[in-house]
Amino acid sequence: MLNEFKIKKYLVNTFLEGLYNKKMRNCWWLGEFFILLVINKLYFVKKGVLERRKVFKNKRIILIRRED
């Protein structure tokens, strides 16, 4: 899961860099804003995945305890 995320992030970053170099040089502030937006989105997606995993782990622990 984490590897998959890293690969996706890398692809997005290279894609963004390409875009940035071609189109955003003239209006750099727009490019900066766009990149910040995407990075924030990625960050929150990752955070959500981690939170979900934490909840799942806790549920499993509770289930194991109930069996005792």
Image: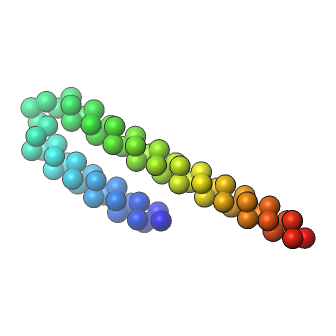
Q: Residue furthest right?
A: 68
Image coloring type: rainbow
Q: Residue at x 52, y 48 (%)?
A: 47
57 left or right of 62 in image: left
Query: Residue 24 lies in what quarter of the image?
Result: top left
Which of the image's four quarters has the C terminus? bottom right
Q: Is residue 22 above or below residue 62?
A: above
Picture coordinates of residue 35 (x, y %)? 28, 40
Query: Residue 28 lies in what quarter of the image?
Result: top left
Q: Residue at x 36, y 43 (%)?
A: 39
* Closer to the camera in the image, 22 or 41: 41
Picture coordinates of residue 8 (x, y %)? 34, 59
Picture coordinates of residue 38 (x, y %)? 33, 42
28 left or right of 36 in image: left
Q: Residue at x 9, y 32 (%)?
A: 26
Query: Residue 59 lies in what quarter of the image?
Result: bottom right
65 left or right of 44 in image: right
Question: Number of callouts in the render?
Answer: 0
Q: Is residue 39 above or below residue 7?
A: above
